[in-house]
Amino acid sequence: MLNHKAKGYRLATMLGLGLMTATWGNAASAGCSYTVTNSWGSGFTAAIRVTNDSTATINGWQVNWAYSKNTVSNAWNARLSGNYSASNIGWNGTLRPGQFAEFGVQGATNGGAVEVPQVTGAACGTAAVASSSIASSKAASVTSSSVASIANSVNIAGLATATTSYVSPWETIRAVNDNSNPANSNDKTAGAYGNWNNPNSIQWVQYDWPQNYALSSTQIYWFDDNGGVLTPTRAYLEYWNGSAWVNAGNVPLAKNAFNTLALNNVVTNRVRVSMLNTTQSTGILEWRVSGTAAGNVASSVSTSKSSTALSSSLRSSIASSIALSSSSARSSTPASSSSVRSSTPAVSSSSSSSAPSVAQCSAYDWPKYEPDLNYDFRTDFGQVDTSKFKVYNGCPASTIAGVKTKGRFAFIWGKNRNPSITDADIDRVLTNLNEDADYIHNVMGWPVDKLQAEGYFSNIYLYGSGLCTDSAANTERGGWQSGINGYPMVLLSYYPVVTPSERGGITHEFIHTIMATRGNKAAWFNEGGNTWLQMNLEASRTGNYGVGFLDATSFLAPHMPIENYSGWLQDGTFGGPNAEGVDRRVNGQQISTWREYLGGNQYNAAFPHFLGVHVSKGANAWIWAKGPHNHILRSLAGGVGEEQTQRMIMEFRARQAMVDFGPWSNAFKVPINNNWGRTINAERIDGGILQDPGAHRLTFYSATTQEGTTLVPSTTTLPGWSGANQIPLKVTGNKVRVSFQPIGQNMRVQLAYRAADGSAVYSKPVTSGEACLDLTKAPKNGVVVAVVSNVDHLYNGEETRTRKHDYRLQLLEGVTGTAPLYDKHYQ
């Protein structure tokens, strides 16, 4: 992007967010499951999962289900027929043992409750519970004996953990429950939550409490800045009944006031408000919830006929059947994965001292991923006829002073155009954009943006020129992808227009319009995936493989998660996939949260390059076209299964240790070498509160202390979720053996080294116990690297974002100690 401060992201609310917290409908059928992912009174969306629990590969599947009153109006990722049958489409028909395919449906309740039907089919097994109904959309009341007196209700929002589908990097989710009292809807003195740039999309904010509360009412003060963030045109509140989200009613939409919705004393530990504005984005200044502690009373389940809470015996029965279903449904994971789940796996002394098998110590060749996700957009998208394009103004004609069209693009400016811009400048911008766009579409096969898909020129608006897009002065600088009336577009100030060297930045923003049209993924992938495509554009067109200076961040701080925005934060935690934890304030004053250099981690394209080189050429396109989730690792698990996704994380981390990225390897070494050993500090924000954690020197390798024969890692750089540590070991002899003792969950270790002949050599990864590698080829400089990785692929909010993963590494054979941390052992 051309201006970090002004940049926003269009993060669509997608089917499947939060599926891991949903309850699956078929309690006894391990192979197939049905879950309601959203409901709003008259309609619903649901996900149906087909899991291969057998020992043989399934080539093609079909499932069936039926409703009493509900009907389906739309389906995706499957072929739908009858009332109702669904079968696979080409890319998700082959399921190896343990893999699953998941597809979605949208439907109407037709005056009934949202149903959870039985799913049947050859892949589903035979035992299943009967179809059931989810609670009605009205909040339930509970008997007076089950809760404390509602007369004692207080604002309990401050006791909740707030999460969201997306928050703009310059806004903060923490503002919603800081108990502030706004003077008006544009009063940001205590901060604000906003989700710009997400026009005409449902976004949500959620409260989670550690115990149940009886909720009497909720009050929401909408954020409205009279620009890109407006009061919703639709908003509704849902509560969690223990197995599904239940609609509690519509929230009023008044501006400059608290909007109150009665909740009728529903008992729950989780509520969510969903909001949409049909033309702009939405936001909240303050969200209060009035309630009282409900002790150990379970979340109430309302029905269309009764508001009485379920009896404890019935709840126990349901919970037992669900637990059995969960266990059975997950049994497709190979038995060896049980050691991955254990928080403190035992390592027997016999396994540490016994001689490992020859096969265990042989060099390891990574198996191919099946399916390989090699998607080509040209399968589903054809070319457009640019000769028939029309101009879509977007702004009122009275504000537009000029429009220039060329090829695929229209450049639009207002009456206050900066006088330094010449017609030749505009023509150069259009010529360059057409050259890049033609290559992206015609040669690389990526689809067009929404405007071109509907027969219009892609729009470039001149920022600060008096258009309806903004009210800025014509001397302000910047450029970014934005949106107008639901169409992604590019907004440029005068500076990139008159500066030829900004060509790459302008193309970067245009690529964002393509990705916004596809339904944007997590914020980090919007940037890293964008730079990956732009690098491949240049490599394909010129044969030159080059990366950016920020592409070394994930190499030089590998303990950072893969899905990470703004890197390793000053408080020692990590930015989340959508910049969670990055924008923080105290009494309205912003806190400086990121560190020098690593704060731009979202722009590194290491993981997209890994996918393109080691998974398949079309894997990144698959994520945009077929990935069902906002979070990228979760989407990949939907394509190749959990076990292969965890293997993918481990492989990525091991190849990072060796800078083993095919034709991109030498390109990555340029920014790595340029920043190797660099000392970074906390980056200060003007007027912000500094949380100075002290200086840190960049390297691949993690510090350890040795206690006897055991290495203990520094707690400062313990890996976050999907993060890794690299420990360089000085070796001798013809074999290396270590014993891995994970303390954190979902950990793996793998040995790797650069041989004297320049090749990269890897051991078989293990989840715990002994890792071994024959040194058939001599290690260069006598060093082997132990790569310890967390392989969690699911991001579940603050607990995931802030968690570190500890371990111990015992030296068994062929290791004389650790090698220097600032030598380049990948060379």
Image: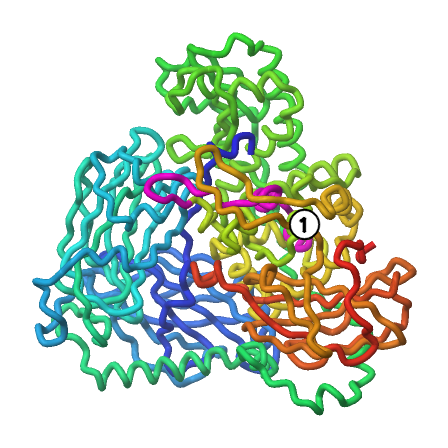
Residue 464 pos. (x, y %): 44, 18
Q: Residue at x 66, y 89 (%)?
A: 348
Q: Residue at x 28, y 63 (%)?
A: 270
Residue 599, magenta (yes or no): yes
User: Which residue is depicted at the point 67% across and 45% down?
Assistant: 679
Question: How many badges with numbers are in the image?
Answer: 1
From the viewer's perspective, is 387 left or right of 179? right
The quadrant of the rendering that contains the N terminus is top right
* Residue 253 occupies quadrant: top left
**x then y, percent, for residue 448:** 55, 37
Q: Nearer the viewer, residue 246 or 747?
A: 747
**Secondary structure found at label 1:** strand
Q: Which residues are magenta?
A: 584-611
List the residue tagged with mark 1: 697
Q: Position of residue 723 (x, y in %)?
A: 60, 61
Q: Compared with residue 468, is residue 361 higher up or lower down, i.e. above or below?
A: below
Residue 740 falls in image quadrant: bottom right
Asked if 565 appears above or below 266 in the picture, the reply is above
740 left or right, relative to 384: right
Quick one: quadrant of the C terminus?
Answer: bottom right
Q: Is residue 93 visible?
A: no
- Type of the residue with mark 1: Arg
Percent of width and height locating residue 659: 76, 54
Q: Residues within 10 Å of mark 1 (few under 14, many from 20)?
A: some
**Farthest residue toward the bottom?**
350
